[in-house]
Amino acid sequence: MIGRRFFGAFTARRDRGATVIELALLMPVVLSVILLVVQSTLWFHGRQVADAAAREGARVARASGAAGGGWQRDAEARALEVVRAIGPRLLAGARARAWERGGERGVEVTGGGVMVVPLLPAGAFTITSRFGGPVECFRPDDGSGTCG
């Protein structure tokens, strides 16, 4: 009986502080996982902002039947307006570029995502979204008129 008490007390003394050591070893891993989850969430939300801005800019570009550069300025301005309205901090340094290829028009929005995880290279979270489609052509019901 005396031996049991002695060895039990010895074991308890030997394990003292083990929880603190385990916590010190596990906390960097737990913190890294939490930061990666937050980082991926912010990247995803920034991507949604870029998608919405590019879609809205492409809608303006496609609906404008005017030939020339006026539609490009309007589409780019609308895309940047959407970024400023929804999430200017989620898409830092946002740039919009209107494009036209054949009978299609669209907008590409690019910006930098929020960086939460330290030690990642600058520009690691560049977000780009591109939307476009055929130019819409409005004609009278009788089929007269041309697009172009």
Image (spheres, helix red, strand yellow):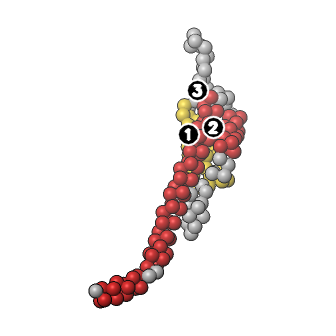
> What's the residue at 33%, 85% (across, down)?
5
Mark 1 against mark 3, which lies toward the viewer?
1
Q: Which residue is mark 2?
A: 57
Q: Amino acid at mark 3?
A: Glu
Of 140 and 40, the residue lying toward us? 40
Of 70 and 10, the residue lying toward us? 10
Other-residue count near label 1 (Cα within 10 Å), few / some / many at <14 / 14–19 / ≥20: many
Q: Is residue 48 visible?
A: yes
Q: Which residue is mark 3?
A: 136
Of 40 and 129, the residue lying toward us? 40
Residue 93 - label? none
* N-term mark: 1 or 2: 2
- In the image, residue 7 sits, relative to residue 20, either above or below, namely below
> What's the residue at 53%, 53% (across, down)?
41
* N-term mark: 2 or 3: 2
Of 20 and 126, the residue lying toward us? 20
Q: Amino acid at mark 1?
A: Phe
Q: Which residue is mark 1?
A: 131
Mark 1 to mark 2 CA distance (whole Å): 8 Å
Q: Amino acid at mark 2?
A: Gly
Query: In which quadrant of the rendered image does the C terminus lie?
Result: top right
Pointers 1 and 2 in contact (CB under 8 A)?
Answer: yes
Residue 56, given in percent of the width and then of the height, sits at: 62, 36
Mark 1 to mark 3 CA distance (whole Å): 15 Å
> What's the residue at 48%, 63% (across, down)?
33
